[in-house]
Image (spheres, rainbow, N blue to C red):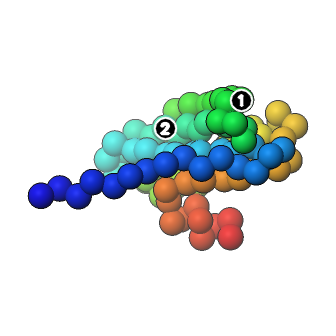
Amino acid sequence: MPKIFTIKWHPPPPSWIKLNSNGATRGAPGTTGVGGLFRNCRGVVKGCFIVPLSTTYAFVAEIKAAIYGIDKAYNFGWNKIWLESDSTYVEGSVS
């Protein structure tokens, strides 16, 4: 029997922007792309990005997605960023 998990998005504190980033590959290494979504404390989408990358590994794509998103947030003038990723590589790199 498959397990069913409830997943819920949690908003950032007021005046913060939440960045949900992700990187994906097809193969190891393989064709790679990264993307991210920026939302405010009310869940309103404030921006997004998708970027194709050169061939690489999934963990590299995840880290590049976070870095690209943080850079994009800086360019938008946002300095209170809550980064959320499903990658332990990203978590270990920024904590």
Q: Amino acid at mark 2?
A: Gly
Residue drawn at (60%, 70%) of the image: 92
Quadrant in the picture for the N terminus: bottom left
* The residue positioned farthest toward the left in the image shown: 1
Residue 25, image x and y in percent? Answer: 40, 44
The picture quadrant where one finds residue 5 is bottom left
Name the element at disc 1: strand
| Residue nearest the viewer, comparing 56 with 35 | 35
Q: Relative to 88, is 70 above or below?
A: above
Is residue 55 visible to the viewer in this orientation of the structure? no
Residue drawn at (40%, 39%) of the image: 31
Q: Which mark is residue 32?
A: none
Residue drawn at (59%, 38%) of the image: 36
Q: Tell which circle, 2 or 1, labels the residue nearer the N-terminal end.
A: 2
Name the element at disc 2: strand
Left or right of 48, for residue 79: right
Q: Relative to 87, is 78 above or below?
A: above
Residue 77, image x and y in percent? Answer: 87, 37
Bin the neighbour count of mark 1 within 10 Å (Cα to Cα): few under 14, some 14-19, many 20 and up.
Answer: few
| Residue nearest the viewer, comparing 75 with 42 | 42
Quadrant in the picture for the C terminus: bottom right
Q: Which residue is mark 1?
A: 46
Q: Amino acid at mark 1?
A: Lys
Residue 50, image x and y in percent? Answer: 56, 31
Residue drawn at (63%, 67%) of the image: 93
Q: Which residue is mark 2?
A: 33
